[in-house]
Image (tube, rainbow, N blue to C red):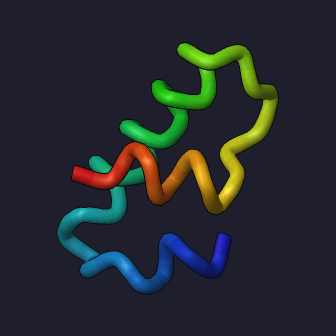
């Protein structure tokens, strides 16, 4: 996911985990750019 590359390297793991958790919470099978943006701290 290209959007994840914009996140500083030391935050990518946390950002990815939060996005995956958010996708599961809303029942989405995939992490979309919108979900990634909504889940960023």
Q: Position of residue 37 (x, y in %)?
A: 46, 58
Q: Which image quarter is the N terminus in?
A: bottom right
Q: Residue at x 34, y 76 (%)?
A: 7
Toward which corner of the image does residue 8 lie, by quadrant?
Answer: bottom left
Q: Position of residue 17 (x, y in %)?
A: 40, 39
Q: Residue at x 50, y 71 (%)?
A: 4
Q: Residue at x 77, y 39 (%)?
A: 30
Height in image: 27 above or below 29?
above
12 to the left or right of 30: left
Height in image: 34 above or below 4?
above
**Count of all numbered marks drawn on residues in the image:** 0
19 to the left or right of 18: right
Q: Residue at x 21, y 51 (%)?
A: 41
37 to the left or right of 24: left
Q: Position of residue 6 (x, y in %)?
A: 42, 85
Please identify the residue farthest to the right as the structure is shown.
29
């Amino acid at each position: 996911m290209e959007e994840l590359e914009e996140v500083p390297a030391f935050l990518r793991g946390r950002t990815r985990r939060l996005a995956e958790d958010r996708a599961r919470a809303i029942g989405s099978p995939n992490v979309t750019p919108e979900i990634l943006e909504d889940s960023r701290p």
